[in-house]
Amino acid sequence: MQIKALIFDLDDTLYDCSNTLSRDRRRELARVVARYKDCSEKEALKVLQGDEEVRKYGRYEGLAHRLGLPPGFLNEIQAVLQRSPDLSQIRLFPNVPPTLQALRGRGLKIFLVTSGNLEEQEAKLNQLGLRPLLDEVMIVKRDGEGKAKGDCFQRLMKKYHLTPKEVMCVGDRIEDELAAAAALGMTTAMLRHGQHYERFASSSQKEMEPDFFIKNIGELLGLLS
């Protein structure tokens, strides 16, 4: 491989989101569903996890319609989604800083393309102290994120005069960054961590297979040697 640049996702790629922020928010959302649906929080979690629009895009209108829930349900869901998370609990995976520094020391460009609320993602970057380790950061809206990330990938390649074969995309979600990268002809590496990887691993019908699987970011040093 003649890799000259890496594009990283943020959540569940450079830090543990599934067992911190995502876990806390899932519990809050499940409490709302449980109250309106008159079921246990455990049952409510299964409802949320089984809804494709909720799981992939964070959209709850279809769920409310299918369950016959009143307008107040969506209002409460939006209140939870708009609430600022407690970022004090998040930390980079231990091998992330030395790995990114080593990769940059080899002359590789390091980019981050993440999706979500702009202010929230910026706050995460500040809490994690990531910006000094990156050559460029792009944040895209959650809706239609696969296409939006693909557009960002193309802009980065154009700006830095890179071809798809010279770029590796590292993330945890097939339907998001990895599918977009593969469609452009980039090399893909999937992190074996978090709720999205677990869903992928247990699925019998996979949209695509990444070129590589890694347990942690540090494995990239050997992979790209």
Image (cartoon, rainbow, N blue to C red):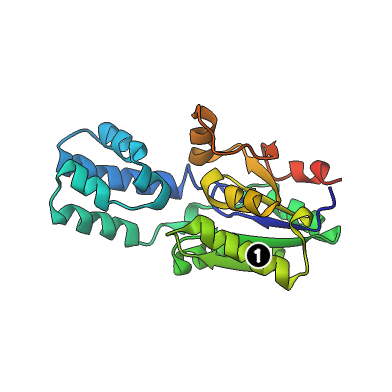
Can residue 189 be seen in the rendering of this structure?
yes
Can residue 91 be seen in the rendering of this structure?
no
Residue 102, placed above or below residue 120: above
x%, y% of residue 1? 84, 47
Q: Nearer the viewer, residue 138 or 102?
A: 138
Residue depicted at x 27% and y 59%: 78
Q: In the rendered image, which quarter is residue 154 located in?
A: bottom right
Q: In the rendered image, which quarter is residue 209 located in?
A: top right
- Secondary structure at badge 1 equals helix
x%, y% of residue 113? 60, 61
Three-letter amino acid code of the residue under disc 1: Gln
The residue under label 1 is 154
Residue 19, placed above or below residue 203: below
x%, y% of residue 110? 72, 61
* 105 relative position to 138: left or right: right
Residue depicted at x 38% and y 62%: 84
| Crowd around label 1: few <14 · some 14–19 · many ≥20 (10 Å) | some
* 126 relative position to 110: left or right: left
Quadrant showing the C terminus: top right
Residue depicted at x 60% and y 54%: 9
